[in-house]
Image: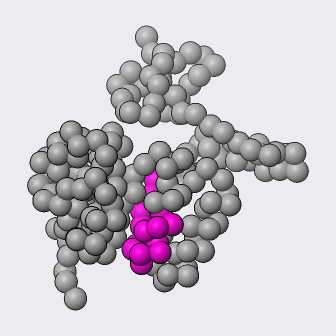
Amino acid sequence: MSDQVRVCFIGAGGMATAVHYPSLADMDDVDLVGICDLNTERLEATADRYGVEGRFTDYRAMVEETQPDAIYIIMPPHHLYDLTIDCLEMGLNIFVEKPPGITAHQVTWMARYAEKNDVIGMVGWNRRFIPVLTHCREKVLAHSDRVQQVVSTFYKCHPDAQGPYYRVMPCTPLIRCAGWPAAR
């Protein structure tokens, strides 16, 4: 058995290049063997930056050629389901970002396919215990007999906040981010 975990990526967008690629590139036991993205400019730039030789616009060809142990599927939620189910059916361990799907039904089937194919499915959900989410969860559970759907958006109020999926806005007394003072 190899000391290296062979990892492929589907997606070379903002979140993947800002968070996931740098983290895995720093790990001695990870070998980034392939990247797939339909935007060839992003694909080439990311592959060049992290020294990844396998460059693809077809994820099935990438999987067939590189034979990865795991695949990161870093896409917007409305694109995850089909890619995830297909990769699980190919016997790949998968990592996806939150939210893992559009509906609870999709997520349930993802878990069933992972179990059926005896592979690991993981969702990166690093904010599930932050104070604002635990507070919202308590509110939802208090009215769970009436709640049909919950949708949330995060607004970063810190003056240095940056990111592809956040709107930066000044803090006010009504919008106060935990641990950050109001903007001047």
Tag count in the figure? 0
Name the side, left or right, on which 75 lies relative to 68: right
Question: Of residues 102 and 62, which is closer to you in this image?
Answer: 62
Q: Is residue 88 above or below residue 179?
A: below
- Image quadrant holding the N terminus, namely bottom left
Magenta-colored stretch includes residue 87: yes
In this image, 110 relative to 17: left or right?
right
Q: Is residue 76 left or right of residue 30?
A: right
Which portion, as a residue range, is magenta? 84-97
Horizontal and vertical percent position of residue 24: 25, 59
Is 128 contained in the magenta span?
no
Q: Residue at x 37, y 33 (%)?
A: 163
Position of 37 with respect to 93 (left or right) is left
Residue shown at 11% from the left, 55% from the top: 51
| 48 or 124, nearer to the observer | 48
Observer able to see residue 180: no
Q: Pick the quarter of the image with the C terminus.
A: top left
On screen, 6 above or below 128?
below
Q: Position of residue 20 (x, y in %)?
A: 31, 52
